[in-house]
Image: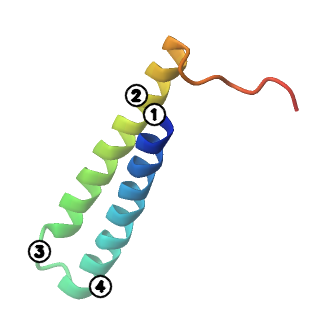
């Protein structure tokens, strides 16, 4: 369940990235949709980072120490 949530958040960050690109091309600087897309992308990235750190702290995710 946790790994699915991580993948969904990563996909949401990628969708936000491409939506910002579309807004940048279409709006020609007349709208704040690019800034809003950036804010959403930063928020999703922070949420993803916090989720991974908490999962590592609780032991739900483990790091692979072997090469």
Badge 4 density bin: few <14, some 14–19, many ≥20, Cα 10 Å: few
Rounded to the nearest whole Å, what is the CA distance between mark 1 and mark 4?
Answer: 35 Å
Distance from label 4 to label 3 (Cα)? 11 Å
Q: Closer to the camera: disc 3 or disc 2?
A: 2
Query: Mark 4 vs mark 2: which is more N-terminal?
Result: 4
49 above or below 25? above
> Upstream in the sequence, badge 4 or badge 3?
4
* Residue ID at (28%, 57%): 38
Quick one: SS at disc 3?
A: loop
Q: Name the residue under label 4.
A: 25
In terms of image quadrants, where is residue 43? Answer: top left
Element type at mark 1: helix
Q: Which residue is drawn at 36% across and 37% down?
A: 46
Residue 23, percent across and down?
A: 24, 77
Which mark identifies residue 31?
Answer: 3
Residue sitting farthest toward the right: 67
Residue 36 position within the rendered picture, expressed as x and y whole percent measured from the top left:
18, 59
> Where, by quadrant of the figure, is residue 17 drawn?
bottom left
Residue 29 percent across, percent down from the top left: 18, 78
For residue 42, above or below residue 38: above
Q: Give the structural element (helix, strand or loop) at label 4.
A: helix
First along the sequence among labels 3 and 2: 3
Q: Which of marks 3 and 1 is nearer the N terminus?
A: 1
Q: Earlier in the sequence, mark 1 or mark 4?
A: 1
Judged by depth in the image, the label closer to the viewer, 1 or 2, is 1
Residue 50 disc label:
2
Give the Cα distance between marks 4 and 2. Answer: 32 Å
CB atoms of marks 3 and 1 within 8 Å:
no
């Amino acid at each position: 369940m946790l790994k699915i949530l991580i993948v969904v958040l990563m996909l949401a960050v990628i969708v936000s990235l491409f939506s910002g690109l579309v807004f940048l091309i279409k709006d020609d600087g007349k709208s704040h949709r690019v800034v809003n897309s950036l804010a959403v992308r930063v928020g999703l990235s922070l949420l993803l980072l916090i989720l991974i750190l908490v999962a590592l702290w609780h032991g739900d995710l483990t790091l692979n120490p072997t090469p």
